[in-house]
Amino acid sequence: MANTRKPIVAGNWKMNGSLALLKTFIEEIGSSEQLETVLCVPSPYLSAAGRGEYILGAQDCSSFESGAHTGDTAVSMLKELGVEYVIVGHSERRQDHNESNELVANKVQTVLNAGLTPILCCGEPLEIREKGTFKEYVLEQLAAVKNVCGVSFLDNTVIAYEPIWAIGTGKTASPEQAQEVHEFIRSNLVSWNEAGQNTRILYGGSVNAGNAEQLFAQKDIDGGLIGGASLKIEDFTVIINTAKQ
Ligand code: PGA
């Protein structure tokens, strides 16, 4: 890692895995002084996953604190289970559940209110990448959060840049493409508030054991949000070890 921000490697199991797989991760993934290893498992597994040495993460939460919202999960409940990080605004939720920038911003605020850390996802679809307006697109996603939460969200939020065309497709953004957007994000965060200098910005989208090193070597990439490769203990371990270097 080319900077002083503590790296994060966060696994996002999405709607995959099993209790048997989780048992392996509980036994084999340790904690480290050099980085934060976060495991975001499906919510039915959170209780069991709390026994591991990694930091526990959730994949989503409600924007409401409690009430008549069948099927949703309150952030206070996640907190009771020992969850510290909550992924918010993942592109699959934006797509599958029509989550708007405003709803995502409200969720960030709810997570912050509970004293947990949001992993705020942003990233453009292929057509926006091809049109060339991807920076504006990503900035709009982040500005919506600033408008609802104020610039202080930068103190306690992790940002994950995940170009949608690179998620689960095997098409990683090149280290240069990723760094270009990370640098753009960082310069905007810093223009909002100096605290943006310390905000960790993760890259996500087909990160694997083979490409993590080059991605993590980029100046503004502070680790990764790992989907597919976080389901294979050997690959996930290699990625964790890469982030320690
Ligand atoms: P992927 O997913 O690593 O499988 O591309 C990343 C993510 O969606 O968080």
Image (cartoon, grey):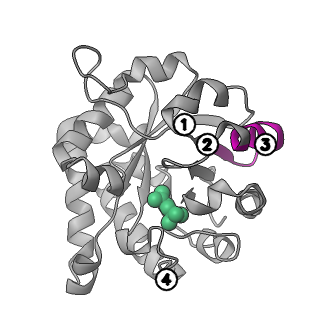
Residue on which the image places disc 1: 57
Q: Is residue 90 above or below residue 220?
A: above
Q: Find the distance from the CA under tag 3 to the CA under tag 2.
A: 13 Å
Q: Find the distance from the CA under tag 4 to the CA under tag 3.
A: 35 Å
The quadrant the C terminus occupies is bottom right
Q: Amino acid at mark 2?
A: Leu
Q: Secondary structure at mark 2?
A: strand
Mark nearer the viewer, 1 or 3? 3
Q: Can you tell which mark lies on residue 24?
A: 3
- Looking at the image, which residue is at 68% across and 73% down? 213
Residue 22 magenta-highlighted: yes
Mark nearer the viewer, 4 or 1? 1
> N-terminal of the two: label 1 or label 3?
3
Q: Find the distance from the CA under tag 4 to the CA under tag 2.
A: 27 Å
- Looking at the image, which residue is at 36% across and 32% down? 61
Relative placement, left or right, of 175 versus 183 is right
Mark nearer the viewer, 4 or 3? 3
Relative placement, left or right, of 100 versus 4 is left
Q: Amino acid at mark 4?
A: Glu
Q: Amino acid at mark 1?
A: Gly
Q: Find the distance from the CA under tag 4 to the CA under tag 1.
A: 29 Å
Q: Is residue 110 above or below residue 76?
A: below
Q: Which contiguous range is marked in magenta?
A: 21-39
Residue on which the image places disc 4: 176
Q: Secondary structure at mark 4?
A: helix
> N-terminal of the two: label 4 or label 3?
3
Q: Given contact means CB atoms under 8 Å apart, are the residues at marks 1 and 3 in contact? A: no
Residue on which the image places disc 2: 39
